[in-house]
Amino acid sequence: MSEIKLVFLEEIPEEIKDNTLYVSMEYATAIHNCMCGCGNKVITPLSPKDWNLLYDGETISLSPSIGNWNFNCESHYWIKKNKIVRAIDWPEKNIDNSDQENWWEQFFLRFTNRFSSFFN
Ligand SMILES: [Zn+2]
């Protein structure tokens, strides 16, 4: 997958392009189109209890992961050093039914239930 482009600006943009992360320090917010390509806007507020943004001068990382469970695609990924790192539970269809992966599935289910209020 190609690198994410970074755009720093003051205002939150109306129109946003795919594969681009827009960061507004003014509003302490980052915004991007869902990286699966579904076209939904993903807004990640930056604060100690929301997302943390790490900018090393060239690349950006966001933590924790971005889980779009309120979209149909239900994509789940990290942005690490301008790269998309897919979480193990996305896409769900590709998960085998081995014990270990079930364990992960359960783990993420619990995790997403706990944090689902963030996304509503
Ligand atoms: Zn999506």
Image (cartoon, rainbow, N blue to C red):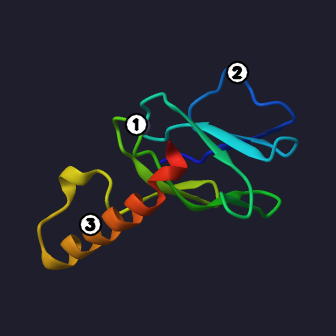
Q: Residue at x 78, y 57 (%)?
A: 58
Q: In terms of sequence position, does the residue under pointer 1 or pointer 2 come before the other?
A: 2
Q: Position of residue 54 (x, y in %)?
A: 74, 63
Residue at disc 3, CB closer than 8 Å to ligand 1: no
The 10 Å Cα crowd at callout 3, few under 14, some 14 to 19, many 20 or more, is some
What residue is shown at x 74% (from left), y 44% (from top)?
A: 29
Residue 66 rendering spot, x and y as whole percentages: 52, 53
- Counting residues from the start of the chain, the first of labels 3 and 2 encountered is 2
Q: Secondary structure at mark 2?
A: loop
Quarter holding residue 17: top right
On screen, residue 48 versus residue 10, left or right, reads left
Kindly tell me whether mark 1's CB lies below 8 Å from ligand 1: yes
- The quadrant in which residue 10 appears is top right
Amino acid under disc 1: Phe
Q: Nearer the viewer, residue 80 or 69?
A: 69
Whether residue 54 sits left or right of residue 108 in the image: it is right
Q: Which residue is mark 1?
A: 71
Q: Residues within 10 Å of mark 2 (few under 14, many from 20)?
A: few
Residue assigned mark 3? 105
Q: Give the x, y percent position of residue 16.
A: 65, 26
Q: Tell me the kind of residue under disc 3.
A: Glu
Q: Secondary structure at mark 3?
A: helix
Left or right: 55 as drawn, with respect to 109: right
Asked whether 116 or 39 is in front, the reply is 116
Q: Which residue is mark 2?
A: 14
Give the secondary structure at mark 1.
Answer: loop
Q: Is residue 64 left or right of residue 35?
A: right
Task: Find the distance from the CA under tag 3 to the CA under tag 1.
Answer: 19 Å
Name the amino acid, label 2.
Glu
